[in-house]
């Protein structure tokens, strides 16, 4: 799955099983990925750019109805894939994202 940046008015949508990913950005300064379940937001992860070569993960949130389903981890992995495509590094300030990086050696190449 791949995505490119777009304005907040025209998010990129990616279907994964019954859930949809949406990528929102704001003039390359901030952005978020959302996982949608129909019209409901299952979870979202917020990031900002630090210069031209780093993405800072600021916050991850999952709606309570979707807790325990791996939505947060999927969001972190989507940022990792995005970072790999853009050939940039990730700075996980969000404590949840930081724990995912600590537990998942296979994604540390973007740190």
Image: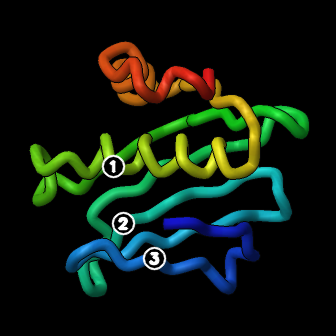
Q: Quadrant of residue 111?
A: top right
Q: Residue at x 54, y 48 (%)?
A: 81
Mark 3–mark 2 distance (CA, rounded to whole Å): 9 Å
Give the x, y percent position of residue 20.
36, 76
Mark 1–mark 3 distance (CA, rounded to whole Å): 13 Å
Q: In the rendered structure, which disc, 1 or 2, sits on the residue that comes first in sequence? A: 2
In this rendering, position of residue 83 left or right of residue 104: right
Residue assigned mark 2: 35
Q: Which residue is drawn at 10% across and 44% down?
A: 68
Q: Quadrant of residue 2?
A: bottom right
Q: Residue at x 74, y 49 (%)?
A: 86
Q: In the rendered structure, which disc, 1 or 3, sits on the residue that comes first in sequence? A: 3
| Secondary structure at numbered mark 2 | strand
In this rendering, position of residue 110 left or right of residue 22: right
| Secondary structure at numbered mark 3 | strand
Contact? badges 1 and 2 (CB < 8 Å): yes
Q: Is 32 rendered above or below residue 67?
A: below
Q: Is 20 rendered above or below residue 80?
A: below
Give the x, y percent position of residue 36.
33, 74
Mark 1–mark 2 distance (CA, rounded to whole Å): 9 Å
Q: Nearer the viewer, residue 38 or 64?
A: 38
Residue assigned mark 1: 74
Give the x, y percent position of residue 79.
54, 46
Number of the front mark, 3 or 2: 3
Mark identifier at residue 14: 3
Classify 10 Å Cα crowding around label 2: few (below 14), some (14-19), many (20 and above).
many
């Amino acid at each position: 799955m791949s995505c490119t940046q777009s304005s907040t008015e025209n998010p990129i949508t990616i279907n994964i099983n019954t859930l949809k990913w949406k990528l929102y950005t704001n003039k390359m300064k901030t952005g978020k990925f959302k996982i949608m379940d129909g019209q409901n937001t299952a979870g979202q992860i917020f990031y900002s750019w630090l210069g031209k070569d780093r993405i800072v993960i600021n916050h991850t949130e999952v709606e309570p109805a979707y807790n325990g389903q791996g939505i947060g981890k999927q969001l972190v992995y989507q940022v990792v894939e995005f970072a790999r495509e853009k050939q940039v590094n990730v700075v996980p300030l969000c404590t949840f994202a930081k724990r995912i990086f600590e537990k998942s050696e296979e994604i540390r190449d973007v740190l």
